[in-house]
Image (cartoon, rainbow, N blue to C red):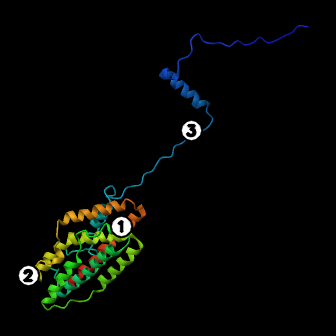
Amino acid sequence: MWLSAKPVQQLWFPATPPPPPSKWSSATRTTVKMRVVFNNTSPPVQKKRKRYRKLYPGETTGITEEMRFVAMKLRNDTTVATAPSTSHDDTWQPSMDGFLRFLVDNNLVFATLERIVDESDNVSYAYMRKCGLERSKGILKDLAWFEERGLVVPTPSSPGVTYAKYLEELAETSAPLFLSHFYNIHFSHIAAGQVIAKKVSEQLLEGKELEFFRWEGDVPEMLKGVREKLNMLSEHWSRDEKNKCLRETTKSFRYMGQIVRLIIL
């Protein structure tokens, strides 16, 4: 019997081994990539494009800068103005009774702020204690001066009582929102208070400078200190909390605007 068998296929080995991939030419690399692509049956992986949130104006600086941008948008709105417009000097005529109501309501608001930050157990409020911008003691001195001259100091009116009550409720529920009012009240008083003081002093007080519009120390530096502390605290707030702070900025200017308008009522 003859045995038949297929010849064994001999393996071919090149005389010299192929170069490693690191030494391939650009043409060889392209060819290999094309073969891999054509031989791969699975579809290519599509990377999801990362979408970045649009930043709020001033967000890179801090929450106080964001609130400043909100205040800038409100400055031409007569419903939230905190000082009489310089373009309407002839129509802005303060009265003594109105100015006393203005001082009394401001005293209630500032005393409420100071009492909350001094007595609260909330750690965030402790950063605002003894900031140098306190106003209630100065207002009390002014009211005593008016009483010495026979003027009757009224009780707080609706705008001041409403705002003080709102601040107390807010302080219990949300530190970020309360601190938004804390900063904006002081900021608006410093920014617009000098305009009010000048007009009232010229028309009603024969140039007398009231304690309400005087500070002991460098006012820009004291306000800067409050601003830096608030920006530091806001780093731990969510974006939603910051957005609510911006909405409270509008409320703060509206409340303060109602108190300012007491001067001319």
Q: Is residue 249 visible?
A: no
Instruction: Quote the CA–CA distance across marks 1 and 3.
Output: 52 Å
Q: Residue furthest right?
A: 1
Q: Position of residue 193 (x, y in %)?
A: 19, 73
Residue at the disc numbered 2: 206
Q: Which residue is depicted at the point 51% across and 24% down?
A: 29
Give the crowd class for mark 1: few <14, some 14-19, many >=20 residues within 10 Å: some
What's under tag 1, amino acid-wise? Answer: Ser
On the picture, is 239 further left or further right than 208? right
> In the image, is residue 216 above or below residue 61?
below
Residue at the disc numbered 3: 44
As helix, strand or loop, the secondary structure at mark 3 comes to: loop
Q: Which residue is depicted at the point 37% across and 74% down?
A: 171
Q: Position of residue 60 (x, y in %)?
A: 33, 55
What's under tag 2, amino acid-wise? Answer: Glu
Foreground: disc 2 or disc 3: 2
What's under tag 3, amino acid-wise? Answer: Pro
The earlier-in-sequence mark between 1 and 3 is 3
Residue at the disc numbered 1: 124
As helix, strand or loop, the secondary structure at mark 1 comes to: helix
On the picture, is 43 further left or further right than 215? right
Assess whether mark 3 and mark 2 are in contact (beta carbons under 8 angstroms): no
Choose top left, top right, bottom left or bottom right for residue 233: bottom left
Q: Position of residue 112 (x, y in %)?
A: 30, 78
Q: Position of residue 39 (x, y in %)?
A: 61, 30
Q: Which residue is depicted at the point 27% across and 72% down?
A: 185
Q: Residue furthest left?
A: 206
